[in-house]
Amino acid sequence: MFSKIIEPRFGDTDALGHINNISIAKWFELARNDLHRLLNPSMDPHEWNLIMAHSSYDFHAETHYGSDVEVRTFVEKIGNSSFTLRHEVWQKEQKTVTGKTVIVHFDFNDRRPILLTDSIIEKLKEHVDGV
């Protein structure tokens, strides 16, 4: 599991007074940085080999400004050329949002998915959650 503590900004809220859904997407992206560093240590965009193919969100409760949140990221499934991540937003010991993201191992020169290497699979397995 990867964990990222985020302090919500006032600008993350909407007119209803809770965290806007687009802010959650940004938080999930930020929470993936540790995974990106694991698979692309240089973080050099010219050597990048990952692309997001899918993202979805389920909102279970409102998330509010004024209290830190923890975004937990788990590897849920490892395929041949892609893997699925599960994200969870926790605030004050309550899970407020869950989401899934499918990441594809991608060759940007040939514009096609490529098989995950054994090295990448082993790194991903360290973060698999059995739930």
Image (cartoon, grey):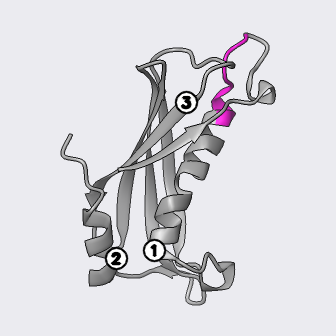
Q: How many marks?
A: 3
Look at mark 1 in the image and give the residue it sits on: 39
Residue 116 placed where, x, y %? 34, 78
Rendered position, 88 above or below 15? below
Residue 43 located within the stretch drawn in magenta: no
Look at mark 2 in the image and give the residue it sits on: 120
Asked whether the beta carbons under mark 2 and mark 1 sit within 8 Å of each other, the answer is: yes
As rendered, which of 53 and 6 lies closer to the eye? 6
Rendered position, 88 above or below 82? above
Look at mark 3 in the image and give the residue it sits on: 69
Residue stretch in magenta: 17-23
Query: Of circles 3 and 1, which is in front?
Result: 3
Q: Quadrant of residue 23?
A: top right
Residue type marked 2 = Ile
Q: Is residue 61 left or right of residue 23?
A: left
Q: Secondary structure at mark 3?
A: strand
As rendered, which of 60 and 12 lies closer to the eye? 12
Q: Residues within 10 Å of mark 3 (few under 14, many from 20)?
A: many
